Image (cartoon, grey):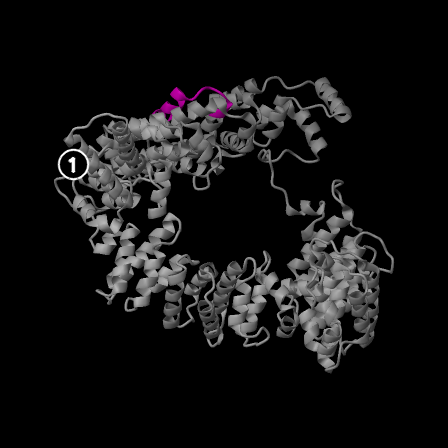
Amino acid sequence: MRQIGHLVQELTRQEMGLAEAEAVRNSWTRFYRDTSGVLHGSGATPEESRERFEGVVAAFEQLFLGLPERVERLRQLALSEQPSPQDAAEIASMSDPRAGNYFFRAAVSRHWRGLLTLDRLLPEATRWPALPYLRRQLAADAPQMCAWVEQHLAAFEARGPGAVGMAVSLVAEAGMTACGVVQQIARTQQDRHVLLRISYWARDVPVSERTGQWVRVVEDVLRQPSFGAQESWEAAQLAGALAQTAHLDGQLRPDGDRLGVIIRSALASLLAGHLPEADKWEFSLVNDLREISLADPPHSVLFTLMRAVLDLAREDARLGVPMSERQRGLDNKLPPGPAADRLRAVVLLESYDEDRADAASSGAWWEQALPLAGRLLAAGSPRADVADFFALLKDACPDQHRAELHNVLAQHLGQAPSAQEIADWKSAYETAHAPLPSAWRTVWELSQVLSPEVLEPWQPLLEIFTALAGQPAPARPEPVVRVTSWIESHGGLSAEAFAARAVEEGPAAAAGHLAIAAVKRTDVDASDARASLLSDLVAQDPQLWARDADGVAAAAAGDPALLAAYFNSLHRAAREGKIADEEVAAIALAAFAARPAAGQESPGAGQLERVICNLLHRAWENGLLLQDAPGAAEGAVEWMEGLVTSWTQPRTDTRQPLLTAIDQPGGAALLSLIAWALQQAQRTGQELADPVRAVLARLLEGEPDDQALAVIGFCLGHLAHVDAAWAEEHADQLYTLDAPWRPAATWLRHGRPHSGVLARLDRTALLQAAAGPDGVPTLDKIILSFLTGSEALGPAPALLTELGAQTGGPQAVSELLSRLAQAAIRCEETSPWPERAAALWRCALEVQLEPAALTGAGRFAYADRLDDAVWLDLTARTVARQPEVEAPYAVAERAARHPGSADALLIAAAMLGAQVDVFHRQEIQGHAALLFAQSTAEGAAEHEQLRIALINAGAIEAAYKDPPAGP
């Protein structure tokens, strides 16, 4: 079996499904068994021998005969209106998954469902070949098809949750007709994906068609803990759909239609199932149940169901449903307790405006509210919604109920504490932070919404609390978890206050106040908190803070970390274009003037030095501070020489030498020094300045420092460009590639392309680097050399031949072609790069490299600026040698644009054999089918080749231009 499975996959490029495996097992196992019997002496009649021979031939045909040779019979079977059991047996013996997929897409007879074995019709874990056929049967006779699924539900379940989920998706297209089988599945399934598909079905059923049975299905889904926990958004939408179904088109249902009653009871029952398990702490986190929204649902299904109950109750009140009917489900289903009472309070809150307009409803409302208020007080820990309920009672209670309200509240609050009890607690609180008794806390939290008559015995206690808190109780209880201002990230310093001070008094004054501001929080570093705040302030308004860089530097002179944050934020703003380049000079000079003293080891000093070097680097790169402030520039050069000297040391084992170097003051100083020398040389037309020449010579000729040499290598292209004589003088140190710490090695990975440098490198070492695991940057430099017309590397055919001969060479050439295509994609419209890229691609074809070297050429399908005729010719030649190319779907799509091209037919045929996922396979088949249908080359050899390729890909309908079989 395993060997045949490998053979089928090799021949069809698709794995056998369960049905194909069963077909192989039935035919080949029987063949081996019967043959073994004959070999061991068992007899056989001529009829049995003939039957065995025909069975073997049929099995060999299924396995070894190509699909194009079997396709006519396959189409005959699919289009048969009256298939026979023998026909069904032939289908059952198919081991080619392409044949099975086509058959079910094309089969027309309703009789196949009764003739074929269940194995052929059932889904597998992730695919269902028979689905197109069964969908057509469902469209023709939904009740019968739903009954068939229900009949074989046990077989579906045996195939796993994936198969059951696909069954739900099938019958879902029948709407309410499928309700019976869906309900049966919902009662037994706990898999979230199956329940999710049932939820999709439920929400897709039109409201006017929903019934009590539909409600029970929704109940079954929402009752499953896994669904609510893992699919909180879908659970909210389903609960919302259930609530909305109670009323048809926003109106009361007619008399005799009890669906609204059923839904109220269902929601209350669902909620009752979750309330006993409600976590008291989690419940207290929601400060106001009215803030819950099904459009942005909570993660807990408990609150989702509460919101659905509240929505339905509010709509009931609007439509005039009697309160007794509204409350019946809650009274009968919900278990007593604080959670249910809190929900009732919000129900009454939201219905008050509707109920007070009707005398009967108003009386019933107060009959519910008064005893509820007492229970809420006794429960304690009131939240904001409960406080609003008490505020409504206080403000709106009719005179005839007020005395009763006061009595209820006073009774449930209990007896107020005596003066001695208050004094004892206050003493214990001040000495040992004694906790507040629950009833006392409730009185304090609700003191703003309870009437004076109720609070009168409690006034001594409230006065003590007010004195301790320094203010009266909040109008509403505050959330248990409160989102605080972002200022907490700065140790309690107020960003708003310092921003306002910078506007009113100027940035220097604000910086001075910040430098000495006390940081309240003790769990953060004070200097870091100030630096973080100043960085954010500069980022918010960089132009304001750039106006007086000298003043800010003077105000913060005692804190290098604060200065580093300030100047670094200005540097970042300059990089982002938020500060004009002309202002950078003044900022750089102010930063240089504020540099740490030599040898200063205070926190932030090194960071400040690095930031100063970066600002000077930016100024010099923009041509600033070269003429206007020569004295300052000379002082800066001398200062940076000192940083470089104190930083360098012999080392060759740094993991990322360039990144490590530029993150340190010495490396940043060396980079900035080179930038100054380059700008000076370009401005004057002379060689590199002597100070920098001396520094570079010392670094190149001394013991190797991989970090310093990495900085030189990063700048090698610029250095060779402005002073070729200097570069040639140090060629042995600069251009050697015998060690990873050499400058040339860094230039290959990170440096600016330069054809002169490329030409000076050892060719063998260069090509080895290009073919190595990190060869992409090197390939990019080789590509750019050819695209710019440079002859630094000699003729392209020779280079490609040598590159392809390296270890990993074919893959490197493939990557080169792929990145060459990307360069052609991104180039300007008038650029000569597409033609030069095509020439290099043509060379790769002509030098007869290994087929694997051509894989990357598929990426040229995206290069629209490459002439179509050129692309068709080169792609056809490429896929003739290497059908497996990059982006085969894009190749097929571009080929499909050219129905008059024979090359396009060949390309599409090759792409149909690409090893891709199912989605891209279908995409390729769609493009190939379109090209085949529109081709003007019918009868040509290329046209027939594409037809055969379509058949081999399983796209038989396209190969015969058959109309779709149905939905």
- Number of marks drawn: 1
Where is residue 383 shown, x and y percent of the image? Answer: 55, 31
In the depicted view, which residue is nearer to us: 545 or 72?
72
Residue type, mark 1 in image: Gln
Considering only vertical position in the picture, is 800 above or below 239?
below
Residue 339 belongs to magenta span: yes
Considering only vertical position in the picture, is 286 above or below 845?
above
Residue at image location 76% in from the left, 23% down from the top: 427
Considering only vertical position in the picture, is 715 above or below 121?
below
Residue 676 found in image quarter: bottom right
Residue at image location 61% in from the left, 26% down from the top: 443
505 on left or right of 301: right
Q: Is any part of residue 669 visible from this angle?
A: yes
952 on left or right of 597: left
Where is residue 77 shown, x and y percent of the image? Answer: 17, 44
**What's the magenta bit mostly, secondary-structure-wise?**
helix
In the current view of this chain or complex, which residue is farthest to the left? 82
Considering only vertical position in the picture, is 98 above or below 264?
below
Residue 244 found in image quarter: top left
Q: Is any part of residue 542 visible from this angle?
A: no
Residue receiving disc 1: 86
391 on left or right of 241: right
**Which region of the structure is painted magenta?**
323-340
In the depicted view, which residue is nearer to us: 628 or 506?
628
Check the picture and name the quadrant holding the N terminus.
top left
Q: Secondary structure at mark 1?
A: helix
In the depicted view, which residue is nearer to us: 350 or 612?
612
Residue 788 found in image quarter: bottom right
Residue 116 belongs to magenta span: no
Where is residue 430 shown, x and y percent of the image? Answer: 76, 26
